[in-house]
Every structure is written in structure tokens, then in C-alpha cells.
Image: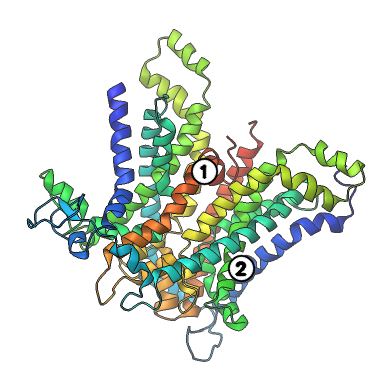
Amino acid sequence: MANHERAPIRWAFVAPTLILLIAFNVFPLVYNLVLAFTNAQLVGGTTRGIGGANFARVFAEPEFAGAVRLTALFVLLAVSIELVLGFAVALALRRDFRGKTVVMTALLVPMMLSPAVMGLFWNLILNGNYGILNQTLAALGLPQPEWLTVGALKFTSMLMIDVWMWTPFMILIALAGLNAIPPAIYEAAEIDRASAWTVFRRITLPLCAPLLGLAVLLRTTDALKQFDLVMAITGPNDENTQTLSTLLYQVTFRDGKIGLGSSFACVVLVIVIAVATVFTRYMERMQRRPA
Amino acid sequence: MKLARRLVIGAYLFAAMLPLVWMALSSFKTRDDAIRPHPNFVPAATASADPRAITFEATLENYTELADVHVGAQASFLEHLGNSLIVGLCSTLAAVALGTAAAYGFSRFEFAGKKDWLFFILSTRFMPPLAVVVPVLIMYRTLDLQGTHLGLILLYTVFNLSLAVWLMKGFIDEIPRAFEEAALVDGYSRLAAFRRIILPEARTGMAVTAVFCLISAWNEYGFAMTLNASGAITVPAYFAGLQGNIAGMPWPQIAAGALIFVAPIVLFTVLVRRHLLRGMTFGTIKQ
């Protein structure tokens, strides 16, 4: 039935979407690659080809290696903290209780909010002199670190905000995984007198793993792009927080070096495409799973 | 065990809510109270003489001042909120319309490379804005789209297509084919069947998709700040631009504006709470 139509009708539904996506995604990729071999500037100057000089600079530049390391560290720490914390909260939320819907909705709100706006507001919370976080720590008799001015703590602050924002996502997915485990399996384990730890390690964790894997991949591809929080906490040019996206911004828009920025972008895109390929393969596998 | 569970939930809820509660409280403070070195969090009718008091004098001034242009800024918060509304609503409408049509095509027809196209669409979501923005910027300079609403609307429409197609495909897959096949037998054209049978059945899906598209357009910052430096500046770009302001950060006004900015999102989160899982995973997990 579905294929009685002539091809033009079939393509008419999908063509506008595909054309727009190619115009705004494939075209920039190709154009980026062309620009990467030039000395193009953001403002003025004549553009001419300079061969692979930009790429040579990308790999010689210590800033690039620094941004790769920092982004990798950020992704690793943010995603693993969110996973562990999210899974722990999901375990606590597993049983039904009165007001669960309200609590759940309140818990999930942070992940829907604007990272740029909330990141900016976190500056007020984290301020060393008048921030509520340090005022609370003072009331508890704890030390009050300078979250926004001490080098290493800027990275911690960024991590903290990301964890605040995205742990809800892990809670949401972990809870879906937990709810999908048939109670009969637990009953069988109880008859076998399995310890709580064994039940967790042999039943709960492995049965949640596929969904948690999806969550980790989604968060990884997202954290890899981290830009908004860095801009909110330190701006683009702080060695303590410079991620790949903010380095791109610094080179292209602050230094005005479009050619060099484009070759940076090409290398970043290779990294992103590699991770995205792993992700889409995984999605494909997930979809073939019986629901 | 029960106590431990309650403690975990309680502590987490406190941490999750604190920034929003603090935002709400700060929006009623004077600037002096907002940056006082001693905590103050109990709204009161009058100011206290004691600088260590936990009360602060509640004022609505920050909300009325949202119409004013802050020192060093080009336009008032309300004007930027207007930009966010125009860009968010128009791009959402376009993304849902195009995405629904494409999702229908992918759901019902077979054609060459269908699966590859679908994964190509998904992969566009992973592009970091900063890695593709330069060619877009040069294109927009040529077409005179820099600093316009239309430029951002186009970009956000495209940016949201991946989400719209994948979410809508999930919803349309759930509509039995028999519905439209009966209509086609009755002499409906394919387009008429799509309009009269599928669209009404897919209403919930379209509403959910619209909410997720609106939220991601509403929150977007990378494209907004790099493309629109002079006109059609949305709220996230406006707020971020206040940093390093010569007159200092207007924290109470920022809190008031940010609260108005995030309030619709909180409301939408409540409305789509049963579909959150689906929306956040591109329709992969259906519950």
C-alpha cells in the first residue's frame, strides 16, 4: 500500500527538511574546510590560500592540547558524577510515596533551564563575599573557598553547575530503567537468599545498563560542546576552564582569525563526529531491541 | 532504610531547588540587600536597622525596572524578551511543521538510503554551534541576515529539525496505518489523508514536540551571541552581555528578569512531565 505512490510524492514530505539540513550543516562543513586553508580574518584583510599552515599551528599550539585535555577531563568528571549521583537518587525514588509526582517534577526542572542564564545567576550564589553558598558554609563552621577567583576552583564551579543541571537527566533515565525490571526477578532472588549487594550487582545494575549507556552517550555528546557555562563563569580565555568550544570562540571572534579558527573547527568536528558515530550506532542497536 | 531514602531525596531536592528559590528571593531585594555579606532571606515590610538581620525589605521595583534600559545596554529586558518570544515561537512552528511532514515520510514510505538519512538527521544535533558558525556568519553577511529575527528563526528551525523529526516519527509510527489506508481507498489523496487523518491523530505528539523545540530555542546561547551582536538579541545573550558592566551587575533586576524568563519553562516542564523521557532521548525511550 505504502509504495503505490509515485516517488515525487514520497520525497515531497522529506525533501524540505533534508535540503535545509544540508544547507545549514553540510555546506558549513565544506566551507569550513576551505577556510581552514586560508588566512581569512573576521574584519578586513585580503584572503589568500596559505596551504596547511593553519593545521600545523593547531597541532603546535599548546592551547589546543590544553583545551582537548580540559574538555576530556570535564566530560569524564561531569558525566561520571552525574551518573553515580543520578543513579543513587533514582534508587531512593524507586518506591512510591505521597507527592512523588510533585517531587519528581521539581527535581527534573534544572535540566530544562537555560545554561547561559542559570550559569550567570550562579555567579551570585558562588560569590566569595556575598554568595549564599559561602554564607551557608560559614554558618556551618566550614571553610569558604573563593569559587570564582581561584584557578582550580573555577573548573570546580563549572563542574558543580553542570552536575546541578544534568543529574536530573540521569535520574529520569535511571528511574525508567529501574521501573522496567520485572518484580518477579527480585522475588526469585529473595527465595535464593541473595544478599542486597548481590541483587544490586547481578540484577539491578546489569538490567539498567543499556538505558544508562544511552544516557551516558547523550550526556557525553552534549558535554563535549560545553560553552555556555564557561562563558558565564570565566569568559572564553581562562586556561582553567577553556574548553574546545570556547577556544574556538576566542580564536575566531576575539582574535578575529577565521582561517585558523576554521582549522581548529575541522579538528574539533572530527572528534565530535567520531563520538557521534559511536552514539548513532548505539541508538540503532537500542531501536532494534524489542520494546 | 526508609529514613536514609528520605534524607537522600530531601537533600537532593534542597540542592536542586536552592538556585531557583534564591532567584525568587533576590528578585524582591534592593541591590544592597542582594549583595550583603550576611545572609538575608526573610522578606519583610520594612528595612531592619541591624546589618546582620536575616530579613530584607521586599520591593517590587526590580520588576517595574525591567522596562528600563540598564546602563551600558542597548535595550530593555522586555525588548529582549520580545526577541526571544518571536524567535522561539516562529522557529518552533516551522520546525514542527517541517518535522511532522518529514516524520510522516520516514514513517510510511520506503526509499533509497532511508536509514542513513535518519541517522544523518540525528547527527546534525551533535554539531557544536561554535564549529559551524563561521560559514553561517559569512552566509548571513552576504544575505543581510545578521542581527535579524529571520536569521535566528531559520537557524533554530534547522537546529530543531533533528529533534522534531525523531520525536514525531515515534508518534506517527504509533498511529495505525489502517486509518489512512481506509481513507485512501475512499478516494482521499495522500495529502488529504495526511491532513485529515494523520494530523488530528498526531496532535499530542505535535504539542510535545513543540514544547521541546521551544525550550531548546529559548535557551540557545552560542549562535545567538555570535550572530546577533547588534539586533534581535535574545535574553540569554543579553544577560551574558551584562557581565563586566561598568555599573556592576544589577543582580536584583537580573533575578527578576531571569525568573520571568524561566517561569514558562517550569510551567512547560510540568505540562509535558509524562513525555520528558521521550523528549530528552529523541523518542528512543517511549513511556
A145 sits to left or right of A186: left
Q: Position of residue A34 (x, y in %)?
A: 59, 77
Q: Earlier in the sequence, mark 2 or mark 1?
A: 2
Residue placed at 70% from the left, 54% from the top? B117
Quadrant where the image shows the C terminus of chain A: top right
Specify the label residue B154 is tagged with.
Answer: 2
Q: Position of residue A23 (x, y in %)?
A: 66, 69
- Give B52 or B137, whichever is nearer the viewer: B52
Query: Disc 2 is attached to a residue of which chain?
Result: B
Q: Circles 2 and 1: CB distance less than 8 Å?
A: no
The residue beneath circle 1 is B271
Color theme of the render: rainbow
Using the rendered image, report if marks 2 and 1 lie on a common chain: yes
Q: Position of residue B51 (x, y in %)?
A: 9, 57
Residue placed at 39% from the left, 35% from the top? A103
Quadrant where the image shows the N terminus of chain A: top right
Query: Disc 1 is attached to a residue of which chain?
Result: B
Crowd band around label 2 with a 10 angstrom C-alpha radius: few (<14), some (14–19), many (20+): some
Mark 1, secondary structure of its residue: helix
Q: Is residue B130 visible?
A: no
A213 sits to left or right of B182: left
Specify the label residue A191 is tagged with.
Answer: none
Q: Vertically, is B249 above or below A160? A: below
Tell which tag, 2 or 1, sits nearer the viewer. Answer: 1
Q: Vertically, is B110 above or below A189? A: below
Name the outermost residue toward the left: B50
Residue placed at 55% from the left, 69% from the top? B152
B139 sits to left or right of B59: right
Q: Position of residue A80 (x, y in %)?
A: 38, 43
- Amino acid of disc 1: Leu
- Give B152 or A30, whichever is nearer the viewer: B152
